[in-house]
């Protein structure tokens, strides 16, 4: 007797649910065992979720904010006086550099020393002949997303040089001034360089903006915040924010390498193979579009840059055949390769002992202090994967006729135009083509290429409709108006349909994330920086990697995902676009749990090689590179109790964790976050939900152009009538309006849930059950 597929699935899911760990609130309890009831906060002090008052972790007990009840019984918060900064604004310690009779001279001397050291490091990097990567190597594909155009190369090199000088100068400074690592990580010292002779390099912190605010966003995200000194906030090229101070062992850029026990941390590849095997656990109601839209959103808000060779080529930190790590004398200063154990069940077959890993590029800070990674794309949720994150990219994508985006017309179907570097994908997957989108990751997996096509078609659909309604509008006006509508639809779908499925309705309410049913929102604040946090991009929003299935079961074939990475050529087949859209909305995604498909953890970007990269190992290595703290520290940040033993996380997983880690204090944020049991009606547990909720709160409260913000604050506000139309947008309508009508003519109204979910039966695309926006609200009287 065999279990039917569905009951086996159910059993697996129950198993997963009971295995999940639920963090325990860290609150004072009365002798009776009941939670203490809290008084309201004093006037003008807000009660916020603990994550939105991050300084509480680092304050001495006597200064900690006191707990309070959040609105509508959604849990406990803190009466916060320190805002969203991870350090309380304490008086900075003054070190003599600042008071030196000729500060400018000593800063300059420090930087000259740093420059000399850097030249030495670069010289050694140049001498190491081995550190190039050939096309065709999986690592070449990994780095393709980081590559900069020839046009930008000098600028990128100059920026990295400057940032590296700051790192070296910070080291010299910290040693000479004998500042503790803790104070350095917390930035409890005066490290401002503004005013010193180097200030010329710091001017890009404030973008030049027109006096009268623009009605439309700028492609690079500048001039969103109107306050002088903040006009570059969250624009392309600006650094990540941090919830907790970095965990660099030197307080500057040296990654965490030792366990709480004092022995070396385990290799992230070992953590991957011990803790994250490939187990098929399909989700009972969520489909693969949740996964794919999630990745699309992540590409909108974040793309980290990598350090490269000076000629822009990727750096290799392993010997060419992967059998050994390059010795320090031969390797680049940005190298942080991942060791592979000799007993690795998978990579040992291919004699691999080293997986390449190059550290993320860092931004000049214009101050001494911990290194800060930056975002290459606009942090704002502003459709940047569709339109690009700078003026040039946007211009390259436009036709300059009718406000439209360029498309490749393939026998009557609109696809994205072919990439200007059409050979690129062919270097990874012979015979493939690459498409051109607003983001360099457009071809990373065929399903994301399809989402890019979906939105580009929507843009052109809206532009055509606006042109019909307003025949006198210019190309420019049609373009910016269509973009404003498409971005609003994207934001609306993200906040109304997607986010509640991920973090649940209670967290939505606690962080004030729900879209309104009418009127304008009033939560815009010039004090909120929308920039993504290190914790969000390096761990929490990478939850999505657990939801990826190793195959697409399309109408006509079962495709292994590594075969469609950088290989979107199937989209040229007449029915494939519809087929992959239908596959995404009808095939379940994978559960969020301690399992990752081999398609990501062994074969990622394999191209024509027998093995690829391990994304789990890379995620964890990236977290160390970016100075992320451990799971326990984020439990504390979110107001939960730390775990004391592996057993706290459940009996089955405990032995696997014990095999990987020496101490529960070493468990990484991404690992602990995935192991939590989901909140009620959510996909994720509280730690990831909190980090994601905090980010999406920044992304609306810190974005002046957010679709719900009214004319008092938003120069691009919609009229009430237009806003009512935006609020009809759904993912189902987007799919229906922009499919080829070959395989997709009907759809379930809730597009992120399987058609088998209760009350979600398919209806014809022209049915009223899938509402339609009426663009007549944009007709000029
Ligand atoms: C479809 C399969 C996917 C592949 C092949 C993939 C691959 C990758 C790779 C190679 C990176 C860069 C890793 C590094 O060097 O640190 C990355 C980063 C990331 N991924 Fe994925 N991913 C996939 C799906 C997803 C999904 C579904 C989500 C979220 C729902 C997601 C969220 C992220 C985030 C937030 C980052 C950090 C981006 C940055 O700042 O550079 N990914 N992914
Ligand atoms: Ca963006």
Image (cartoon, rainbow, N blue to C red):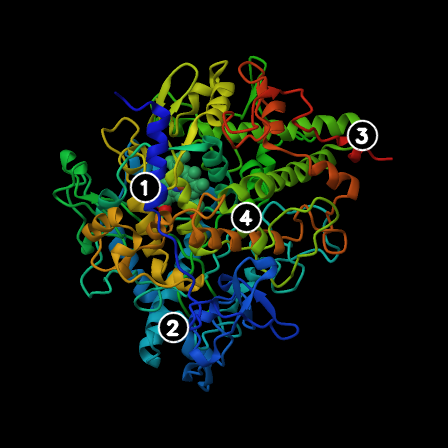
Estimate the spatial distance between the alpha carbons at disc 2 and disc 4, rounded to whole Å. 28 Å
Q: Which mark is residue 615?
A: 1
Estimate the spatial distance between the alpha carbons at disc 1 and disc 2, rounded to whole Å. 31 Å
Dividing the image into four equal quarters, which quarter contains ligand 1?
Answer: top left
Estimate the spatial distance between the alpha carbons at disc 4 and disc 1, rounded to whole Å. 24 Å
For discs 4 and 1, the disc positioned in front in the rendered view: 1
Q: Which residue is mark 3?
A: 470
Which residue appears farthest toward the front when viewing the image? 32
Which residue appears farthest toward the bottom when viewing the image? 101
Question: Does the residue at mark 2 contact the one at mark 4 (Cβ under 8 Å)?
Answer: no
Secondary structure at badge 1 equals helix
**Which residue: 63% across, 41% down?**
492
For discs 1 and 2, the disc positioned in front in the rendered view: 1
Horizontal side of residue 178 vs 266, given as left or right: right
Q: Which mark is residue 184?
A: 2
Q: Which mark is residue 378?
A: 4
Q: Which quadrant does the N terminus fall into?
A: top left
Horizontal side of residue 392 vs 587, given as left or right: right
């Amino acid at each position: 007797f065999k279990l039917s597929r569905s009951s086996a699935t159910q059993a697996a899911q129950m198993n997963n649910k009971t295995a999940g760990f639920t963090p325990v609130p860290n609150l004072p309890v009365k002798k009776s065992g009941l939670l203490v009831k809290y008084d309201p906060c004093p006037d003008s002090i807000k009660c916020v979720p603990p994550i939105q008052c991050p300084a509480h972790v680092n304050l001495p007990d006597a200064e900690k904010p006191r707990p309070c009840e959040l609105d509508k019984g959604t849990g406990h918060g803190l009466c916060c006086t320190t805002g969203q900064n991870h350090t309380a604004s304490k008086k900075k310690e003054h070190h003599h550099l600042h008071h030196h009779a000729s500060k400018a001279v000593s800063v300059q001397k420090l930087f000259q020393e740093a420059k000399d050291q850097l030249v030495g490091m670069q010289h050694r990097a140049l001498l190491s002949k081995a550190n190039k990567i050939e096309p065709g190597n999986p690592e070449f594909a990994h780095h393709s997303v980081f590559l900069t155009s020839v046009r930008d190369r000098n600028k990128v090199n100059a920026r990295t040089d400057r940032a590296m000088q700051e790192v070296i100068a910070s080291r010299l400074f910290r040693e000479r001034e004998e500042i503790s690592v803790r104070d350095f990580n917390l930035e409890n010292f005066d490290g401002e360089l503004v005013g010193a002779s180097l200030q010329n390099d710091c001017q890009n912190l404030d973008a030049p903006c027109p006096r009268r605010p623009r009605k439309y966003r700028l492609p690079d995200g500048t001039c969103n915040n109107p306050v002088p000194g903040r006009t570059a906030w969250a624009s392309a090229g600006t650094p990540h924010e941090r919830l907790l101070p970095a965990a660099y062992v030197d307080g500057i850029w040296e990654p965490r390498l030792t366990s709480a026990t004092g022995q070396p941390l385990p290799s992230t590849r070992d953590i991957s193979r011990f803790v994250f095997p490939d187990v098929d656990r399909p989700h009972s109601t969520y489909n693969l579009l949740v996964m794919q839209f999630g990745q699309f959103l992540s590409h909108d808000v974040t793309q980290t840059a990598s350090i490269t060779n000076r000629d822009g080529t990727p750096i290799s930190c392993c010997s060419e055949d992967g059998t050994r790590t390059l010795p320090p004398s031969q390797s680049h200063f940005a190298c942080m390769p991942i060791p592979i154990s000799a007993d690795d069940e998978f990579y040992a077959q291919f004699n691999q002992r080293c997986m390449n890993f190059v550290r993320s590029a860092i931004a000049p800070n214009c101050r001494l202090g911990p290194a800060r990674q930056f975002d290459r794309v606009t942090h704002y949720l502003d459709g940047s994967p569709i339109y690009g994150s700078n003026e040039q990219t946007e211009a390259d994508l436009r036709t300059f006729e009718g406000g439209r985006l360029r498309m490749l017309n393939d026998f009557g179907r609109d696809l994205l135009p072919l990439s200007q570097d059409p050979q690129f994908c062919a270097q990874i997957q012979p015979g493939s083509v690459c498409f051109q989108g607003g983001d360099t990751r457009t071809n990373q997996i065929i399903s994301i290429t399809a989402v890019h096509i979906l939105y580009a078609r929507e843009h052109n659909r809206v532009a055509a409709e606006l042109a019909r309604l307003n025949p006198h509008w210019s190309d420019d006006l049609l373009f910016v108006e269509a973009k404003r509508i498409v971005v609003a639809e994207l934001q609306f779908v993200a906040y109304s349909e997607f986010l509640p499925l991920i973090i649940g309705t209670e967290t939505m309410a606690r962080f004030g994330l729900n879209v309104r049913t009418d009127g304008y929102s009033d939560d815009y604040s010039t004090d909120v920086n929308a920039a993504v946090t290190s914790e969000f991009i390096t761990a929490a929003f990478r939850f999505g990697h657990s939801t990826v299935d190793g195959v697409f079961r399309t109408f006509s074939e079962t495709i292994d995902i590594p075969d469609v990475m950088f290989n979107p050529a199937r989209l040229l087949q007449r029915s494939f676009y519809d087929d992959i859209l239908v596959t995404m909305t009808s095939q379940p995604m994978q559960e969020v749990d301690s399992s990752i498909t081999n398609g990501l953890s062994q074969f990622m970007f394999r191209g024509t090689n027998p093995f690829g990269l391990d994304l789990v190992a890379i995620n964890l290595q990236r977290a160390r590179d970016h100075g992320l703290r451990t799971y326990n520290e984020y439990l504390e940040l979110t107001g939960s109790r730390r775990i004391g033993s592996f057993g706290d996380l459940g009996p089955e997983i405990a032995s696997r964790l014990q095999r990987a880690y020496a101490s529960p204090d070493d468990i990484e944020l991404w690992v602990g976050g995935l192991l939590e049991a989901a909140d009620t009606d959510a996909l994720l547990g509280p730690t990831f939900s909190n980090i994601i909720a905090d980010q999406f709160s920044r992304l609306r409260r810190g974005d002046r152009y957010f679709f719900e913000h009214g004319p008092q604050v938003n120069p691009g506000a919609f009229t009430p009538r237009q806003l009512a139309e935006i609020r009809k947008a759904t993912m189902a309508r987007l799919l229906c309006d922009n499919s080829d009508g070959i395989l997709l003519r009907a759809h379930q109204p809730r597009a992120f849930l399987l058609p088998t979910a209760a009350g979600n039966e398919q209806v014809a695309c022209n049915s009223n059950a899938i509402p339609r926006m009426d663009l007549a609200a944009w007709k000029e009287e």
